[in-house]
Structure formats: C-alpha cells, structure tokens
Image (cartoon, rainbow, N blue to C red):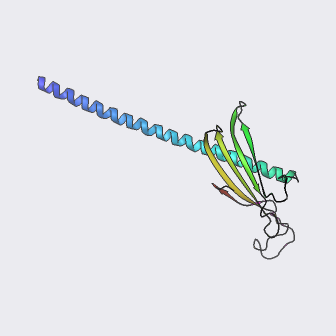
C-alpha cells in the first residue's frame, strides 16, 4: 500500500510539472503575441506621422509659391522636420520631409516628396515608416494618360502619380 502511495505522489509531481511547463509556454507565447501586436500598432502610428508629413508638404506647396525655399539656384532638394505633440503636450513623434525638384521642369514635370514618420524618442524611436510619392506638375495633359483627345490643360495637375510605402529619397 505504501508503494502505491509513493507512485501516486510521483505521478502527481510529474503531471504538475507538465502542466507548469505548458502554462509557462502558453504565457510566453501570449507575451510574444502581445509584443507583435504592439509593434504593429507602433508601425501604424509611424505611418500616420509619415502621412501627416506628406499632407503638410502638399498643403505648403499648394498655398505658398516660395515653397520649398531656394537659397542657391543649383539646390534641388529641401528637407525639414516637424515634431508632433500628443494630447498631453508631450512629444509623440516627428516626421522628416524631403522635397526633390530635380525632375520638376520640362520634360518630366514631376515633384518627388518623401516623408518618414518616427514614433517615440528621438534617440531610439519605437517605429519608423517611409513614404515616397511623385506629384504631377505637367501643365498640359500627358499624352500617355488618356488618348485621344489631347487637351491643353491637365485635369490631374498637382495629384499624386503614385505613392510607395517603405521608400525614401
């Protein structure tokens, strides 16, 4: 009888250890899933910051004739950065916008904008997301867009030709 009690005790200890190992494995799996979900939220917030940079740059381009400022006739790129504050007034993140006017003249009529959003601290951001877009500056309709008829005015002027995620200038 004593022998049976000892074997039952050993069986209970083995089962308890097995359940403990399974519980720890389950908790570590949940912790990694939680980190992955939080990382996905951080990337989406950095994407929102990058979009805010693009929206601000296009607003400046449409309202201010002297934007981007040129201090030199050979300058083709202009870069600036803006800090974004949260509801509590603390820094939330920032974005950096680059305006490239290399292809702005004839025959291309394309303005390239790049915006990168950073979430969190400046020394070690929690997430980074980049967007690259090209804006149509062609004053007349491009012949390869809708043929025929070729119109003299471009209905898509100052619209994005494309927007690519994950690319920078």
Q: Is 140 situated above or below 57?
A: below
Q: Residue at x 12, y 26 (%)?
A: 3
Q: Is residue 161 left or right of residue 18?
A: right
Q: What's the residue at 61%, 43% (across, down)?
A: 127
Front residue (pair 93, 59) = 93
Q: Give the residue displayed 66% in from the left and 51% down from the top.
A: 130
Residue 37 percent coordinates (x, y): 54, 42
Query: Against 160, is 116 above or below?
Result: above
Image quarter (top left, top right, bottom left or bottom right) of the C terminus: bottom right
Give the image quarter of residue 86: top right
Q: State the residue lying farthest toward the bottom.
A: 148
Where residue 16 appears, x then y in whole percent?
Answer: 29, 30
Residue 12 located left or right of residue 166 = left
> Quadrant of the rendered structure where residue 20 is?
top left
- Residue 117: image x %, image y %? 67, 46
Q: Main secondary structure of the magenta part?
A: loop
- Identify the residue at the far top of this view: 2
77 with respect to 42 (left or right): right
Query: From which residue to which does the magenta span run?
Result: 145-160
The stretch drawn in magenta includes residue 59: no
Please say if 26 is above or below 130.
Answer: above
Question: Taking 122 as reference, is 5 above or below it?
Answer: above
Q: Quadrant of the N terminus?
A: top left
Residue nearest the viewer, comparing 142 with 109: 109
């Amino acid at each position: 009888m004593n022998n049976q009690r000892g074997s039952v005790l050993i069986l209970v200890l083995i089962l308890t250890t097995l359940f403990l190992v399974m519980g720890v494995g389950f908790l570590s799996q949940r912790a990694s899933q939680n980190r992955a979900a939080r990382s996905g939220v951080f990337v989406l917030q950095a994407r929102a910051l990058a979009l805010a940079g693009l929206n601000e740059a296009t607003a400046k381009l449409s309202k201010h004739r002297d934007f981007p400022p040129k201090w030199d006739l050979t300058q083709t790129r202009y870069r600036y950065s803006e800090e974004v504050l949260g509801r509590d007034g603390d820094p939330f993140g920032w974005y950096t916008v680059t305006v490239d006017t290399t292809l702005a003249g004839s025959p291309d009529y394309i303005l390239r904008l790049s915006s990168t959003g950073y979430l969190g601290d400046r020394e070690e951001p929690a997430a980074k997301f980049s967007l690259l877009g090209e804006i149509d500056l062609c004053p007349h309709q491009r012949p390869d867009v809708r043929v025929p008829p070729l119109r003299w005015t471009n209905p898509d002027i100052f619209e994005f030709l494309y927007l690519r995620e994950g690319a920078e200038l």
